[in-house]
Image (cartoon, rainbow, N blue to C red):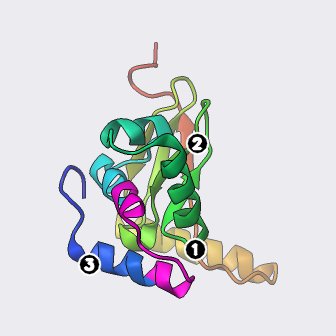
Amino acid sequence: MGADLPDIDLHRSIAARLAEHGQHYTANRRAVVDALARAGAPITLPDLLAVDESLAQSSAYRSLSVLIDVGVVRRLVHVGDHALFELAEHLTEHHHHLICESCGTVVDVTLPDRVEAAMDRTFDEVATALGFAPLHHAVDIYGTCATCTP
């Protein structure tokens, strides 16, 4: 989605998900979704507030909490002082993260379909062997970004 405004289908999907959980798609929740979509990558609450300066911190955090609870937003805790937030994959696309352990930068990466298929097969085999029923996976790669690499 990047810098583009979210499409109407995204908002309809989120409104429906909230309704399923007895919640309303308030103007503040929509503003949070718009800011996350415009960011195009996981962002902290301070960064979210910078994307949309009309958002108040307390109401943005409350909206994030509800959106997380209903599965619309994913909260990532990796490195640094702040959690990162992004739209859930079922609203965007399946991806993984490159995480710099030095500065905390997080970059979304999409792997080729053949790699994802091989990972899915392997995860399914391992999980099934242990009597576990896998639903999805998340793989994050930790290291040092180009800016932080000496």
Q: Which mark is in front, 1 or 2?
A: 2
* Disc on the earlier residue, 1 or 3: 3
State the residue at coordinates (55%, 23%): 102
How far, Cα to Cα, is label 1 from label 2? 22 Å
Q: Is residue 22 magenta?
A: yes
Q: Which mark is in front, 1 or 3?
A: 3
Where 8 sits versus 38, above or below?
A: below
Quadrant occupied by the N terminus: bottom left
- Magenta span covers which residues? 17-32
Q: Give residue 138's position: percent from left, percent from top.
A: 56, 61
Disc 1 element: loop
Q: Residues within 10 Å of mark 2 (few under 14, many from 20)?
A: some
Q: Give residue 111's position: percent from left, percent from top.
A: 39, 59
Disc 3 element: helix
User: Which residue is outermost to the right?
Assistant: 130
Q: Are marks 1 and 2 in contact (CB under 8 Å)?
A: no
Q: Give residue 139's position: percent from left, percent from top.
A: 56, 56
How far, Cα to Cα, is label 2 from label 3? 27 Å
State the residue at coordinates (41%, 72%): 25
Q: What amino acid does circle 1 point to?
A: His
Q: Give residue 79's position: percent from left, percent from top.
A: 61, 34
State how many labels appear. 3
How far, Cα to Cα, is label 1 from label 3? 23 Å
Q: What amino acid does circle 3 point to?
A: Asp
Q: Residues within 10 Å of mark 1 (few under 14, many from 20)?
A: few
In the image, taking residue 9 as reference, residue 136 lies left or right, namely: right
The residue beneath circle 3 is: 9
Any mark on residue 136, and which? Answer: 1
Q: Is residue 119 magenta?
A: no
